């Protein structure tokens, strides 16, 4: 088992080439204000979890590690080389596009400790920046040097993922007015909104490098890990201080968002709508959030969510049996554990 410090160090090392790839891939020819809006969240930082997972998956398939792998020239099964870093950049562009538009839809002021794009610029620039990132993702994915057949499969997979993400976002919005959503309906929503991009991140290297037998197992690994990641994010929103989160603690409760915690609590008879008595962002105190969290804990909902996240992680790790044993595979397993035990 790989410890959290080792996982954090491994992710950090792989974050550097991802950040370099992102900087190189944002086109510099677009108008200056749109350029700034497009780069805004990319420059605000982020863990780059999805592209680093992609790089680890590529390392495992190629039986290389960070010291020996060349991400711009990873060996495919037919002897060709593939630029998997471009695939990682493509994934992060999609992730960032979703954040830009999510913040606009939710009218959120802060992301990654910085003003959201529509606050730093305006609504029009935020829409356009998201659109640029979305389009650029597919441009970059077509620059991996993979065979036409594999490149087409990769583009199709990412396009399908984007459709699912939009479907999941639509269901999430509908949940704000549909207070009787079940636990299983919630899990289906996060499967589409969040988990599908983790699944795509994990399996794209198998598609591009020609390891066809590993595509679906790696997708299932990523999907389960993505579900667990979102559930843990729901928990962090309730339990992590605002300064650490980079956004207001309890914002999901304030905005009336459905989470696994609140969905379960409602099924236990908790009056979710009355927990904060109509509080709005900026008007709710830490003490009010503390009382709401205590009520959710007493209903067993925090523990229910933690247990479900852990089960997803354990199931996801079983799918890694398709990979050769080695450090990258162990780091993928360690990453799954880390994502449900991280503190922010």
Image: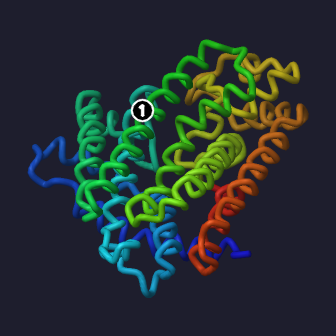
Q: Quadrant of the N terminus?
A: bottom right
**Viewed as shown, does residue 96 lie left or right of 126?**
right
Q: Quadrant of residue 294?
A: top right
Question: Alpha-carbon neighbours of circle 1 within 10 Å: few (<14), some, or many (≥20)?
Answer: some
**Viewed as shown, does residue 212 lie left or right of 254?**
left
Residue nearest the observer in this picture, 269 or 273: 269
Q: Residue at x 81, y 33 (%)?
A: 291
Q: Quadrant of the C terminus?
A: bottom right
Q: Position of residue 242 (x, y in %)?
A: 60, 46
Q: Position of residue 276 (x, y in %)?
A: 72, 23
Q: Residue at x 85, y 37 (%)?
A: 297
Q: From what the image shows, is residue 160 above or below residue 25? A: above
Q: From what the image shows, is residue 161 above or below residue 44? A: above
Residue nearest the observer in this picture, 89 or 80: 80
Would you name the residue on which mark 1 appears? 163
Q: Position of residue 222 (x, y in %)?
A: 58, 53
In this picture the colour scheme is rainbow
Number of numbered discs visible in the structure rendering: 1
Label 1: element kind: helix
Q: Residue at x 72, y 45 (%)?
A: 239
Q: Position of residue 28 (x, y in %)?
A: 13, 54
Q: Residue at x 85, y 31 (%)?
A: 295
**From this viewpoint, which residue is outermost toward the bottom?**
67
Q: Quadrant of residue 79?
A: bottom left
**Viewed as shown, does residue 341 lie left or right of 82?**
right
């Amino acid at each position: 088992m790989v410890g959290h410090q080792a996982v954090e160090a491994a992710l950090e090392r792989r974050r550097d080439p991802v950040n370099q790839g992102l900087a190189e891939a944002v086109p510099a020819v677009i108008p200056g204000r749109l350029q700034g809006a497009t780069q805004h969240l990319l420059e605000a930082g982020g863990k780059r979890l999805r592209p680093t997972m992609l790089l680890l998956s590529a390392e495992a398939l190629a039986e290389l590690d960070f010291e020996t792998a060349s991400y711009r020239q990873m060996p495919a099964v037919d002897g060709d080389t593939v630029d998997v870093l471009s695939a990682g950049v493509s994934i992060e562009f999609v992730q960032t596009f979703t954040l830009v538009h999510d913040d606009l839809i939710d009218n959120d002021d802060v992301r990654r400790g910085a003003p959201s794009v529509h606050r730093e610029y305006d609504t029009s620039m935020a829409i356009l920046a998201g659109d640029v990132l979305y389009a650029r993702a597919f441009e970059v994915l077509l620059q991996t040097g993979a065979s036409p057949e594999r490149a087409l499969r990769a583009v199709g997979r990412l396009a399908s993922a984007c459709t699912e993400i939009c479907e999941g976002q639509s269901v999430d919005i509908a949940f704000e007015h549909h207070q009787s959503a079940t636990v299983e309906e919630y899990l289906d929503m996060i499967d589409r909104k969040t988990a599908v991009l983790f699944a795509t991140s994990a399996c794209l290297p198998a598609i591009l490098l020609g390891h066809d037998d590993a595509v679906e197992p790696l997708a299932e690994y990523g999907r389960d890990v993505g579900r667990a990641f979102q559930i843990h994010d729901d928990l962090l929103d309730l339990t992590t201080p605002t300064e650490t989160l980079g956004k207001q603690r309890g914002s999901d409760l304030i905005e009336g968002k459905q989470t696994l915690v609140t969905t379960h609590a409602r099924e236990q008879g908790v009056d979710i709508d009355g927990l904060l008595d109509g509080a709005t962002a900026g008007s709710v105190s830490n003490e009010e959030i503390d009382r709401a969290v205590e009520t959710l804990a007493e209903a067993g909902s925090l523990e229910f969510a933690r247990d479900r996240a852990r089960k997803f992680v354990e199931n996801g790790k079983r799918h890694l049996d398709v990979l050769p044993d080695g450090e990258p595979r162990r780091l993928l397993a360690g990453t799954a554990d880390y994502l449900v035990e991280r503190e922010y």
